[in-house]
Image (cartoon, coloured by chain):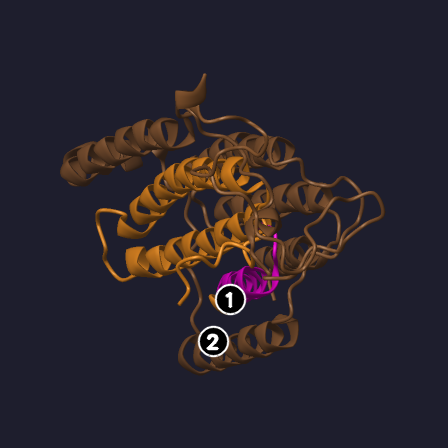
Amino acid sequence: MEMADIFMLLIAVIAGGAALFVVTSANVVHSALALVVVLVGVAATFLLLGAEFLAWTQVLVYAGAVIVLILFGLMLTRAPVGPVREDNDNQRLAFGVSFALFAFLMVLIVTSLGDTTLLLTVTPTVGLAEFLYVEWAFPLLAMGFLLTVALVGAVIIARQEEGEGPLPDDEAYIDHSEVAPVRAGDSYAEPGFDPPRTTDRPTGVPARSDV
Amino acid sequence: MQAVFPLFFGALLFCTGIYGVLARRNAVLVLMSVEMMLAAVTVNLVTFGSMAVGAGDLILTGQIFALFVIAIGAAEVGVGLAIILLLYRNRATVNIDDADLMKY
């Protein structure tokens, strides 16, 4: 086992532990901060694999911008700062599904790639740029178009519309067909009382032709 | 380096992400789990790209795909948070178990 293997296992243990903390922590802000550790671990993996440009892109875009965006999202949705119950009732099923998938993937990886070794060479950023802007020029332009569309779409979705706002609680609008309880002091009709209609003349008032 | 270790890391991140997507109630936490799954995909792409370079791939397909995945992930976070903010403004909650209007 060479040095890179030991570092890779160390990164996998640290970032994997942080990932488990992200999905199990009861405190959403702690989850967001543990996500930083996971993404920095991914960037360190890129560095070990020789992809320097990708590593710094990962640090800048994910550990920088995306985490700030997620923390803004937590703040703007008034996430509770203290611990709350954040898991739903699917917890056991979700654990079963993810653990079964993990076991399946590990069996596949070990049986098919168990004795493959990677040739670790540092990819020069200049070489990456030459391929990105020549061979991959059209996908790069499509990516720029997609980023523009996503930016405009996010602004349009999140914009405050006219007359839009939080609805009153839905419970207040549900008709449970219950008779409202009669409290002391309420005036209510006796059974059999015929309420006056608007076509009836008020009692004690002479007809208009008599005036 | 053995190819098993970064692939193990990617599988671990992906499966924890799946657990988070299925088991969490807060929509922002679900978005964070999706981010972890995307990061797992980029780890896998770079690892297989490193193997492909050893096998004669001359245009660094793996790393450039990983770059595109990072860009798509950033766009996805922007649109996803905009949708979550809209949900919060209209329903005053980000619990995705409550947002089941189109379920049936």
Residue A75 sits in which quadrant? top right
Q: Are marks 2 and 1 in contact (CB under 8 Å)?
A: yes
Which residue, given by chain and number where applicable, does mark 2 sit on? A105
Task: Give above or below for A61 relative to A209.
Answer: below
For mark 2, name the chain: A
Q: Which chain shows up in brown? A: A
B46 or B16, which lies in front? B16
Which residue, given by chain and number where applicable, does mark 1 sit on? B11
Chain B shade in the render: orange
Q: Position of residue A44 (x, y in %)?
A: 56, 45
For residue B1, say whether it is visible. Answer: no
Residue shown at 30% from the left, 32% from the top: A147
Q: Position of residue A112 (x, y in %)?
A: 40, 80
Residue shown at 19% from the left, 37% from the top: A142
For mark 1, name the chain: B
Task: Give above or below for B45 relative to B15.
Answer: above
Residue shown at 21% from the left, 50% from the top: B58
Q: Is residue B72 rendered magenta in the image?
A: no
B41 or A74, which lies in front? A74
Q: Residue furthest top?
A: A211
Residue shown at 45% from the left, 27% from the top: A207
For badge 2, the amino acid type reads Leu
Mark 1, residues whose alpha carbon is within 10 Å: few (<14), some, or many (≥20)? Answer: many
For the magenta stretch, what is the residue range? B5-26
Q: CA distance from mark 2 to mark 1?
A: 7 Å
Q: Is residue A151 left or right of residue A185?
A: left
Q: Is residue B8 rendered magenta in the image?
A: yes
